Amino acid sequence: MKRSLALAMLLTLSLAPSARAANEADYKAAYAAAEAASKEAAGMRNQWTVTVSALAAAKKAADGGDFDRAAAAAREAEALAKASIFQATSEKEAWKAMEIR
Protein backbone atom coordinates (compact mmCIF):
# COMPACT_ATOMS: atom_id res chain seq x y z
CA MET A 1 0.00 0.00 0.00
CA LYS A 2 2.80 2.43 0.87
CA ARG A 3 4.52 1.74 -2.44
CA SER A 4 1.41 2.49 -4.47
CA LEU A 5 0.76 5.66 -2.49
CA ALA A 6 4.33 6.85 -3.05
CA LEU A 7 4.08 6.03 -6.75
CA ALA A 8 0.74 7.80 -7.08
CA MET A 9 2.09 10.89 -5.35
CA LEU A 10 5.18 10.91 -7.57
CA LEU A 11 3.10 10.68 -10.74
CA THR A 12 0.61 13.30 -9.54
CA LEU A 13 3.29 15.83 -8.66
CA SER A 14 5.21 15.32 -11.87
CA LEU A 15 2.14 15.70 -14.07
CA ALA A 16 0.87 18.88 -12.38
CA PRO A 17 0.26 21.55 -15.00
CA SER A 18 2.65 24.47 -15.07
CA ALA A 19 1.40 28.03 -14.57
CA ARG A 20 3.15 29.37 -17.68
CA ALA A 21 3.74 28.19 -21.21
CA ALA A 22 6.78 26.02 -21.68
CA ASN A 23 9.54 27.11 -24.01
CA GLU A 24 12.28 25.17 -25.75
CA ALA A 25 14.64 25.49 -22.77
CA ASP A 26 11.99 24.04 -20.44
CA TYR A 27 11.49 21.13 -22.81
CA LYS A 28 15.22 20.47 -23.16
CA ALA A 29 15.69 20.46 -19.38
CA ALA A 30 12.72 18.14 -18.84
CA TYR A 31 13.85 15.85 -21.67
CA ALA A 32 17.39 15.63 -20.34
CA ALA A 33 16.13 14.69 -16.87
CA ALA A 34 13.75 12.11 -18.36
CA GLU A 35 16.44 10.63 -20.56
CA ALA A 36 18.86 10.33 -17.64
CA ALA A 37 16.26 8.57 -15.49
CA SER A 38 15.33 6.31 -18.40
CA LYS A 39 18.98 5.33 -18.91
CA GLU A 40 19.28 4.57 -15.20
CA ALA A 41 16.20 2.33 -15.40
CA ALA A 42 17.61 0.62 -18.47
CA GLY A 43 20.84 0.01 -16.59
CA MET A 44 18.82 -1.74 -13.92
CA ARG A 45 17.17 -3.82 -16.68
CA ASN A 46 13.76 -2.44 -15.73
CA GLN A 47 12.98 0.14 -18.39
CA TRP A 48 9.25 0.37 -19.08
CA THR A 49 8.06 0.55 -22.68
CA VAL A 50 5.65 3.37 -21.79
CA THR A 51 8.65 5.48 -20.76
CA VAL A 52 10.18 5.05 -24.20
CA SER A 53 6.84 5.94 -25.78
CA ALA A 54 6.52 9.09 -23.66
CA LEU A 55 10.05 10.16 -24.65
CA ALA A 56 9.19 9.64 -28.31
CA ALA A 57 5.99 11.66 -27.90
CA ALA A 58 7.95 14.47 -26.26
CA LYS A 59 10.45 14.56 -29.12
CA LYS A 60 7.68 14.49 -31.72
CA ALA A 61 5.82 17.36 -30.04
CA ALA A 62 9.03 19.40 -29.78
CA ASP A 63 9.81 18.78 -33.45
CA GLY A 64 6.36 20.20 -34.20
CA GLY A 65 7.03 23.26 -32.04
CA ASP A 66 4.51 22.36 -29.30
CA PHE A 67 6.79 22.83 -26.30
CA ASP A 68 3.92 22.71 -23.78
CA ARG A 69 3.01 19.19 -24.87
CA ALA A 70 6.67 18.23 -25.28
CA ALA A 71 7.61 19.33 -21.77
CA ALA A 72 4.55 17.59 -20.31
CA ALA A 73 5.42 14.34 -22.11
CA ALA A 74 9.03 14.62 -20.96
CA ARG A 75 7.92 15.13 -17.34
CA GLU A 76 5.62 12.11 -17.68
CA ALA A 77 8.52 10.05 -19.07
CA GLU A 78 10.70 11.09 -16.14
CA ALA A 79 8.00 10.11 -13.65
CA LEU A 80 7.56 6.74 -15.34
CA ALA A 81 11.31 6.13 -15.36
CA LYS A 82 11.57 7.02 -11.68
CA ALA A 83 8.65 4.71 -10.92
CA SER A 84 10.40 1.87 -12.74
CA ILE A 85 13.58 2.57 -10.77
CA PHE A 86 11.55 2.52 -7.56
CA GLN A 87 9.99 -0.78 -8.60
CA ALA A 88 13.36 -2.33 -9.40
CA THR A 89 14.94 -1.30 -6.11
CA SER A 90 11.96 -2.27 -3.97
CA GLU A 91 11.60 -5.67 -5.60
CA LYS A 92 15.32 -6.41 -5.59
CA GLU A 93 15.04 -8.19 -2.23
CA ALA A 94 11.25 -8.39 -1.80
CA TRP A 95 10.97 -11.48 -3.99
CA LYS A 96 12.62 -13.50 -1.23
CA ALA A 97 9.55 -13.05 0.96
CA MET A 98 7.46 -14.74 -1.74
CA GLU A 99 9.76 -17.73 -2.07
CA ILE A 100 8.35 -21.05 -0.91
CA ARG A 101 10.48 -22.51 1.84
Image (cartoon, rainbow, N blue to C red):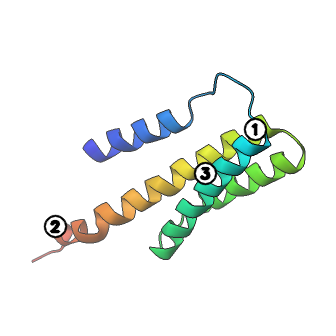
As drawn, the residue found furthest toward the front would be 25
Which residue sits at x=60%, y=51%?
77
Q: Where does residue 49 sit, x and y in percent of width and height?
A: 61, 62
Q: Is residue 98 above or below residue 8?
A: below
Which residue sits at x=88%, y=42%?
65
Which is more N-terminal, label 1 or label 3?
1
Q: Nearer the viewer, mark 2 or mark 3?
A: 3
Q: Where does residue 94 sit, x and y in percent of width and height?
A: 23, 65
Q: Kindly report the distance in space between the C-alpha atoms of the residues bearing marks 2 and 3.
A: 31 Å
The 10 Å Cα crowd at callout 1, few under 14, some 14 to 19, many 20 or more, is: many
The answer to whether residue 69 is seen in the rendering is yes
Q: Amino acid at mark 2?
A: Ala
**Residue under numbered circle 2:** 97
Q: Where does residue 53 sit, x and y in percent of width and height?
A: 69, 57
Closer to us: 32 or 93: 32
Q: Amino acid at mark 3?
A: Ala
Find numbered disc 1 in the image and state the secondary structure of the residue it sits on. helix
Closer to us: 5 or 99: 5
Which is more N-terminal, label 3 or label 2?
3
The 10 Å Cα crowd at callout 2, few under 14, some 14 to 19, many 20 or more, is: few
User: Image quadrant for the C terminus?
Assistant: bottom left
**Residue under numbered circle 3:** 77
Find numbered disc 3 in the image and state the secondary structure of the residue it sits on. helix
**Residue under numbered circle 1:** 69
The 10 Å Cα crowd at callout 3, few under 14, some 14 to 19, many 20 or more, is: many
Q: Is residue 31 above or below residue 41?
A: above
Which residue sits at x=53%, y=72%?
42
